[in-house]
Image (tube, grey):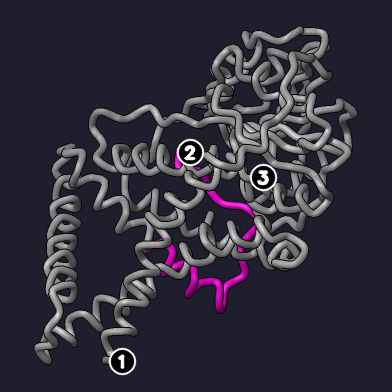
Amino acid sequence: MTYLFIFYLFLFLIFYVYIGYFILILVLGFFYNRKVKKEKNYPNICFMIAAYNEEKTIEEKLKNTLCLDYPKDKLKIVVVSDASSDQTDLIVKKYLSDNVQLIRIEGRVGKTQARNEAVKMVDEEIIVFSDATTIYHKNALTYLVQNFSDPEVGMVTGHLIYTEDANSSMSVGQSTFWQYESLIKKAQTKLGTLTGSVGCITAFRRKLYTELPAHIIEDFTGPLCIIQKGYRVVYEDKALCFEKPTKRSRNEFSMRVRVIRGGMTGLFFAREVLNPLQYPMVSFQLISHKILRWLSPLIFAFVFIFSNFLYLIQVESLLVSLCVWLEYTFLFLVFLGFLCEKKSIKINGISFFYYFFVLNLAASKAMIDQLYKTLPANWETDR
């Protein structure tokens, strides 16, 4: 029956986006492992910390960075203040030295443009982009830069670990989903290159930096520009950093809407990489892991409506009946997750279903906003 074929097709797309693609790249990575040539080396690094009104976190961040296990004569720390209006700049000035500098950008231009301007003012071989809220393991830089011994590597991203909040159900889902994403990054590296980076722990060769429009988020677009120049973007799972997760679903929702919109805008900017003839593996990854992921709310909606329609007209299919049962079970678990958040109750399994729902709701909002709203260059931090 035509109806059943269409239903099975969209059901397969859901399976492929979240499970099939994951299994496929793990299997491919097992048979084809394009290893990175790693050796210990200590190039000159500019450790660039983006900051806007980070008076609550910037001192801890500076202390952490100053204690990193890396030769002090090869590490310059630069705080890029995007017209901070609180005590951020004054706190940084207490630490100014030959190794610590403050670059203040006037006019509140946004993180991307602030970094554009700051990169022009430094001349170190390697630049590391970090956020003011991210705490690095003491050996993180050493593990990051050893990948640059391979001349084919242009960018390296590290392994972010969310430190769960004991009182937040949202943090459980976020941490679990990020572990899944980290496995995908590891498999993509084996296949040749990543198509994105972890924005709070990204190192790259300064000569490869592409100045991006202010409204484009560099976490996603920067790596694509590196790939266009013929270099690899790789994942280093030993380079650890830590961040506190989002505590409330509304904050995670807002952040995800912006990240997804940034990805959509950035992919259009670097759309050349979607050419399967020139970038076969990259285009495959982007379609499977990004574009279909962004479209998954529409696919979910179609499957929900179509499965219920087929069930009501009594189409004989065990898969249709199972799908309907799973759909309403999922919605019930999402509702329980919502109640758990309201009551500050943390139940791991339920929290994950709620987080997954918030992710897809954010993707829906991002698609709608992208049709008629320009992505702003700056935003207010949730701190």
Mark 3 vs mark 1, foreground winner is 1
Left or right: where does residue 102 sit relative to residue 135?
right
Tell me if residue 367 is in the magenta stretch: yes
Where is residue 192? Give x, y as percent. 67, 44
Query: How many residues crowd around disc 1 within 10 Å: few (fewer than 14), some, or many (20 or more)?
Result: few
User: Which residue is label 1 attached to?
Assistant: 2
User: Which residue is label 3 attached to?
Assistant: 193
Query: How many residues crowd around disc 3 within 10 Å: few (fewer than 14), some, or many (20 or more)?
Result: many
Looking at the picture, tell me which residue is in the foreground, 151 or 359: 151
Secondary element type, mark 3: loop
Secondary element type, mark 2: helix
**Residue at position x 37%, y 74% in the image:** 299
What whole-number distance in Å separates the C-alpha atoms at marks 3 and 1? 39 Å
Q: Amino acid at mark 2?
A: Ser
Quadrant in the picture for residue 373:
bottom right
Q: Earlier in the sequence, mark 3 or mark 1?
A: 1
Quadrant into which the C terminus falls: top left
User: Which residue is label 2 attached to?
Assistant: 182
Mark 1 vs mark 2, foreground winner is 1
Q: Amino acid at mark 1?
A: Thr
Tell me if label 1 and label 2 are in contact, CB under 8 Å: no
Left or right: where does residue 172 sit relative to residue 215?
left
Mark 3 vs mark 2, foreground winner is 3
